[in-house]
Image: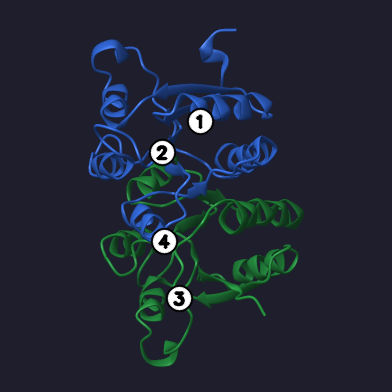
Chain colours: A blue, B green
């Protein structure tokens, strides 16, 4: 199946391969066909969104899932850059992290995050979370087209 | 007793506000629904001015777009530029499904855009998805 048949595109910004794999599996278990694109850190994510270099053909994501702790450009720095960029700031960004620190939660919303999800340990819990996420972003709310 | 979730509903139409209240009563979560009628009142509420003194800070704001005095667009813009209030998630709740409204709302920092359905059953269902997301799935800032 070609990726354009996938109705929704999610950009996952995550440096940890095991975590990225878990997210991928959870979306595969979901009810919706999601074109899940993954980049490793904030620098790559900006390249993806600005379609530079190898991302020239990249699809604009409907939603960004963002880890906080990553090398080079971390999630906070990335979030700040995206929300200050006129062309990118309308894309909803949901933080997906292991941190439950109150300072991380408040600063994420402060910088413009549209949600903050603490990754569960259990894969079944995570599958359920992804379904709630899909219910909200791909069923309940309207998002900007293209 | 666990703390109720507080939602500030900014809506000038009394019938729509009533419908929203009913939909939350059908929901699974105890919600303290506070209602104001336009952006000006909503700002006064958040700043705890006069009659709003001591009111709880909302966990979420549900915002209509078309209202007199200060409309939803202007309110959203002001809140997202105010460092005391900008962390509060704002979800637009409107009858408009104009693409320009959708885009402009996200652009100004809305964390969702819900088009009100005509049927009450559909609306109850929508409110449940909203509750699932904001009060079960995601963590929100804890206010003192």
Residue B47 to residue A30: above or below:
below
Q: Nearer the viewer, residue B46 or A65?
A: A65
Spatial separation of the CA atoms under disc 4 and disc 3 = 17 Å
Q: Residues within 10 Å of mark 1 (few under 14, many from 20)?
A: some
- Image quarter where the C terminus of chain A lies is top left
Disc 4 + disc 3, Cβ < 8 Å: no
With respect to residue B87, does A140 lie above or below? Answer: above
Write down the residue under mark 4.
A102
Tell me if residue B96 comes above or below residue B32 in the rendering: above
* Between marks 1 and 2 in the image, the one whose residue lies nearer the viewer: 1
User: Mark 1–mark 3 contact, CB under 8 Å?
Assistant: no
Seen at 32% across and 64% down, the residue is: B79
Q: Which mark is residue A67?
A: 2
State yes or no: discs 1 and 2 in contact (Cβ < 8 Å): yes
**Separation of disc 1 and disc 4 at Cα?**
22 Å
Mark 2 packing: few (<14 Cα in 10 Å), some, or many (20+)?
Answer: many
Q: Secondary structure at mark 2?
A: loop
**Pointer 3 indicates a residue of which chain?**
B
């Amino acid at each position: 199946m070609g990726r354009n048949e996938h109705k929704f595109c999610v950009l996952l910004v995550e440096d940890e391969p095991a975590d990225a794999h878990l997210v991928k599996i959870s979306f595969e278990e979901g009810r919706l066909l999601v074109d899940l694109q993954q980049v490793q850190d904030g620098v790559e994510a900006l390249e993806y969104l600005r379609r530079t270099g190898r991302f020239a053909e990249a699809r604009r994501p409907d939603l960004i899932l963002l880890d906080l702790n990553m090398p080079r450009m971390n999630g906070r720095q990335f979030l700040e850059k995206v929300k200050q960029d006129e062309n990118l700031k309308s894309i909803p960004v949901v933080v997906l992290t292991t941190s439950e620190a109150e300072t991380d939660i408040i600063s994420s919303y402060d910088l413009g995050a549209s949600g903050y999800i603490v990754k569960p340990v259990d894969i079944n819990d995570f599958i359920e979370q992804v379904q709630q996420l899909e219910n909200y972003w791909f069923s309940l709310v309207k998002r900007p087209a293209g | 007793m666990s703390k109720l979730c507080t939602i500030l509903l900014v809506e000038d139409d009394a019938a729509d506000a009533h419908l929203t209240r009913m939909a939350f009563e059908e929901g699974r979560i105890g919600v303290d629904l506070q209602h104001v009628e336009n952006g000006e009142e909503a700002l006064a509420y958040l700043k705890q001015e006069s009659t709003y003194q001591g009111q709880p800070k909302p966990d979420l704001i549900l915002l209509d777009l078309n209202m007199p005095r200060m409309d939803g667009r202007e309110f959203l813009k002001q809140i997202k530029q105010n460092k005391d209030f900008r962390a509060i998630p704002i979800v637009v709740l409107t009858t408009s499904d104009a693409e320009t409204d959708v885009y402009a709302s996200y652009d100004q920092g809305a964390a969702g855009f819900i088009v009100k359905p005509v049927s009450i059953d559909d609306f109850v269902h929508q409110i449940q998805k909203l509750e699932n997301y904001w009060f079960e799935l995601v963590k929100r800032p804890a206010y003192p």
